[in-house]
Amino acid sequence: MSSTSNLPLAPLGPQRSLRESVTESLRAAIIAGALEEGTLYSAPALGAAFGVSATPVREAMMDLAREGLVETVKNKGFRVTRMSDRELDEIAAIRLLLEPPVVGDIAGTVPPAGIAALRALADAIVTAARQGDLAAYLAADRDFHAELLRYGGNGQLVELATSLRLRTRMYGLRSLSESNRLADSAQEHHELLDLIEAGDGGAALALMRRHIGHARGLWATGEQESPPEEGA
């Protein structure tokens, strides 16, 4: 069982309930690789690292188990599930089929109030990136894309795309954050909104494809790579 004393866990956010804060921090630690795949972690040890009891950690881990990020090990704790490069490639390929067409279709249709709300989320993404708060970054990013996709009018697609986003591992995020490059990447959310507001569906679709490509390139490894081809 891994020691948690030196893990770079994200601080717990005061704006959420304790359970939600622990869940977001653990999710970010898994997605960014601070909690390692295949490693067994106990709720008491993780609670000690956070400075909280084991109870909110157990509750958070059960939430993450439902998302497929961890699996329970009876009387021992929780193991971070392994995800192969092929599985990550397949997730990216599915997201490329789902998300860019919606973004292209909604260009020019989002009302001013909706654009303003999305701008606020985009600002939160950039702020979190600049502060190196990966838990807040991933939460705001998830909310931004879910809200954006809702304008396509397909709730099942929003749910599926959000689930796929939660399962994606992006081990380059920490190095990008530490080198101050994550904030530059985060600006793409504002660029995407500019195109949607201007009604440029083709450019918005292309930018969304590139944005998803980061999940298997820049954000996955910290190094720029070409996005996977659609249907790959």
Image (cartoon, grey):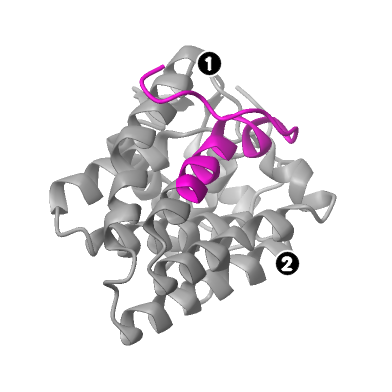
Let me know if residue 207 is in the magenta part: yes
Query: Residue 144 bears which disc, if any?
Result: none
Let me know if residue 20 is in the magenta part: no
Q: Amino acid at mark 1?
A: Asp
Whether residue 127 can be seen here = yes
The secondary structure type at the circle numbered 2 is helix
The percent coordinates of residue 124 (x first, y second) are: 56, 72
Mark 1, other Cα within 10 Å: few <14 / some 14–19 / many ≥20: few
The secondary structure type at the circle numbered 1 is helix
Residue at mark 1 to residue at mark 2: CA–CA distance: 29 Å
Quarter of the picture holding the C terminus: top left
Q: Is residue 184 left or right of residue 69?
A: right
Query: Residue 85 bears which disc, if any?
Result: 1
Return the disc, 1 or 2, that comes first in the chain's sequence: 1
The percent coordinates of residue 207 (x first, y second) are: 51, 50
Of the pair 119 and 130, the residue shown nearer to us: 119
The percent coordinates of residue 123 (x first, y second) are: 57, 75
Q: Which residues, given as a range, are shown in magenta?
A: 206-232
Figure quadrant of residue 50: bottom right
Of the pair 23 and 67, the residue shown nearer to us: 67
Of the pair 170 and 78, the residue shown nearer to us: 170
In the rendered image, which residue does mark 2 sit on?
A: 131
**Farthest bottom residue?**
113
Whether residue 22 can be seen here = no
User: Is residue 151 depicted above or below 178 in this figure?
Assistant: below
